[in-house]
Structures are given as C-alpha cells and as structure tokens.
Image (cartoon, helix red, strand yellow):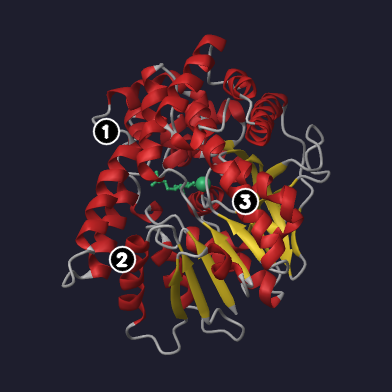
Amino acid sequence: MRLTILGGGGFRVPLVHGALLGDRAEGRVTQVVLHDLDADRLSAVARVLAEQAADVPDAPEVTVTTDLDEALRGADFVFSAIRVGGLEGRAADERVALDLGVLGQETVGAGGIAYGLRTVPVADDIARRVARLAPDAWVINFTNPAGLVTEAMSRHLGDRVIGICDSPVGLGRRIARVLGADPREAFIDYVGLNHLGWVRGLRVAGRDELPRLLADPALLGSFEEGKLFGTEWLRSLGAIPNEYLHYYYFNRETVRAYQQADRTRGAFLRDQQAGFYDEMKRPDAAALSAWDRTRAEREATYMAENRDAAGAGERDADDLSGGYEKVALALMRAIARDERTTLILNVRNRVTLAALDSEAVIEVPCLVDANGAHPVAVDPLPGHATGLVCAVKAVEREVLSAAASGSRTTAVKAFALHPLVDSVNVARALVDGYTAVHPGLGYLT
Ligand code: G6P
Ligand code: MN
C-alpha cells in the first residue's frame, strides 16, 4: 500500500512514520512518498526517517519528490499536511492581527481567516489533481484550518477527503483518565466544527459519566480544560469545550497574553524549526535526536500563553504527546482493512446538525469502515454553541467564496463577520495588512 505525504518535508512527518513502523499487520503501508516544494527540507526529514527505521525489519520504502503529480499517481492514501507560506507566514498572520488588537492564532479568528485565504486555492489545486490522477485514493487532511480546508477539498473529492485533528481525542482521553475510564471503551459525545466543539457526555457501558465529573470540583479542576476554563465556567456550560474555545470565552485575556509574549507561537516555531533544518545541513548531525529534542520542546510549550493567561501552570506530562499520528493511522487502517472503529473526524454534515446544510464540514464522531467515515447521530447543540458554530461556518463560506472569486470585498466580509473581529474597520485594516505582507494573497483584488 502506498501513502503519499504532501508537506513531506514537514516537522511532524516523523511522528506519522514512527506510527507506520509500529504497524506490523497485513496490508500495512509498504511505500511512503514524501512530496514537498523544498528539497532541503525533504532531505532533512528523510534523514530522520532513515534513523528511525534503522533497526526495523520491513520498514516502508521511503522516496522523496518535488513533483506533485508524480507523488499523487498510484497513491492509495494521501496525507495532506502542507503549510502555505511556511512558519514565516504563520508569524505574520499573528503579528498583523495582534497589532490591530485581535487574535492571530492560525486556526481561530483573524489569523485563521488569513491562513485559510492563503491555503484554500492551493488545497483546491491539490484536490483537483487527486481527482484526476488518483481518483480512488483517500485524502486525509491535516492542514489547518482543518475544517475549512477539508470543506474546500470536499467540493472536488466528496467524502473521499476526511479532515483530522488530535484535539478532540486528547480531550476525550483526559476526561476518561480523570474519570478512571478506559478511553478505548468510552464513547465521547462531541460535536461542533474543528477547534470549536464541546464534549457533552462520555458514555461507558451505556452510562454517561460526565455528570459525575461536573459534580466534583476537585476532579474537574485537575486536568487541562479545568485549569484553562475554570471549574465554575465548565459547570455553567454543563460541557467541556475544546481547548481552542479558550480564545472565545477568554478572548480579551488571550489577546493580551499573546501581545505581551516575547515571541508569538508562530515566531517561536519558525526560529526553533529553522535551527533544526539548519542543523540537518551538517552531514554529521544526529538527525533523530535533534528532531526529538525539538519536538519535545514544541510540545511542552503548546498553548503556553493561554495557560499563562489562565494561571494553569505547566502541561501535564501525560498530555505532551497529542496523538496526531495515532488518529491518522487508525483512520487509514479502518478504511484500508475494514477495521470498524469510531473516530472524531471532520466530514460533511449530512443531517447531523440541523442548523447547517448537508455539505458543511463538521467535527463529529464517525463510524469508519471500508466505505469511509459516517457521522453518528448526536443530540442538538444548545443555542449558544449553535450560534457560534453557525457564525463561524458563515465566515468559512465567505473565505471559500473569496478564494473562488478573488474578491477583496468578500474577504473583508469574512473578517468582519467573525465573532472575534469587533469592527468592520478592523476587518478592512486586516485585509490591507495581510495583503501587504503575503504574496499568496495577491489574488484578492
Ligand atoms: C494541536 C492542534 C493542531 C495543531 C497542533 C500543533 O494538536 O489540534 O491543529 O497543529 O496542536 O500546534 P503548534 O502550536 O505546536 O503548531
Ligand atoms: Mn487541530
């Protein structure tokens, strides 16, 4: 079986490769094709993979290419993990927004819109090529903003593109852990959009254990979301929000924390990864250990500003590994080998959330088998959550429409309608600011 990874020179590729190396089952991936625009990054990552595979018998064969069509031909699965504009672009997304007093995070608010506007045209092109060159391939989209990018690709690929994120899995695992339940045996009642969802229940053997957690302030305050949101707010909501909702519920505090930080997350990762890729240019560098050191530092500092703003302290050691590669592998195995399972994924709504149309990509538990991912019926969201989901989906639709038409006016509308952008004037200034720094937004006229 052949797996093509787009963004194959990306920093998280060794995580996926590590998971593949642990898969000994019949029908596993035997060929990995890494595609990237940057040949130096490809060779850096290929060195890490070679060290990872050194003692593993029958490791998948790894090839690299900078030719997209060649990478796609013959693929059974395509992982799309590209970053249009690189980490420099991410840092610029943050800076422009923060200077105007709004959030610049890569998936939430103004930053997510800017990143989406840059990425959608590229994702469209990839999806069209997959449809032409590898029509039977399944595409697993990791590229942020993952829900929006998956929806863009679904317009060409239908249900053959599935978006993934490890945030809901990590959240479900943390809740199960504090409740003393086995995450593999728990059904996580979670729904929303990517980075905008809520856990409303956690069922073990048919019984909802979440009320027990909400009733116990000590237990509730003992894990990441309890510390981030505060137990009182979680009890008011009667649900556990995805960690990215911290940017909504505590917007003022998070914007301030990001403005005061020495470096934004994007700037930190840009510098940190530049160090890693530079080191890989030295022929004698120990690739795997350099990568692992860099990875550990990245994980330890994940959402550090949010935790600072909330006084939440250090990350729990058990939370350090997100499990991004495990979701990807579980999804691929379920499809390729008909190993039926339930995973929280980004797929088209169909009739799951009544407030959205059937084509809207949502994040929801899905039954996965050889026929793909099928969303499970869930209870409706409460009004406040439906309101946010509908508002953000409307913004995503404006982004898709601006990317298709190239209309600057539509781009302004996308920013202005976002709940975290507080003025149409700010939206206009954001479009001016972003188009001035991003060559990839030159299509907006
Ligand atoms: C979480 C999010 C991902 C994000 C990742 C890394 O897993 O769900 O969408 O890409 O963290 O975040 P970072 O800030 O380290 O790039
Ligand atoms: Mn994510």
> Is disc 1 placed on a helix, strand or loop?
loop
| Badge 1 amino acid | Arg
Viewer-side residue, 167 vs 215: 167
Residue 187 rendering spot, x and y as whole percentages: 66, 55
Q: Which residue is mark 3?
A: 125
Mark 2 in CB contact with mark 3 (< 8 angstroms): no
Residue at horizontal 49%, vertical 53%? Answer: 82
Label 3 SS: helix
Specify few, some or many for label 1: CA neighbours under 10 Å numbering under 14, 14-19, or 20 or more: some
Q: Amino acid at mark 2?
A: Ala
Query: Helix, strand, or loop for circle 2?
Result: helix
Q: Is residue 201 left or right of residue 278?
A: right
> In front of the other: label 2 or label 3?
3
State which quarter of the image contains the N terminus: bottom right
Please name the residue that numbered disc 1 is placed on: 263
* Residue 96 percent coordinates (x, y): 39, 24
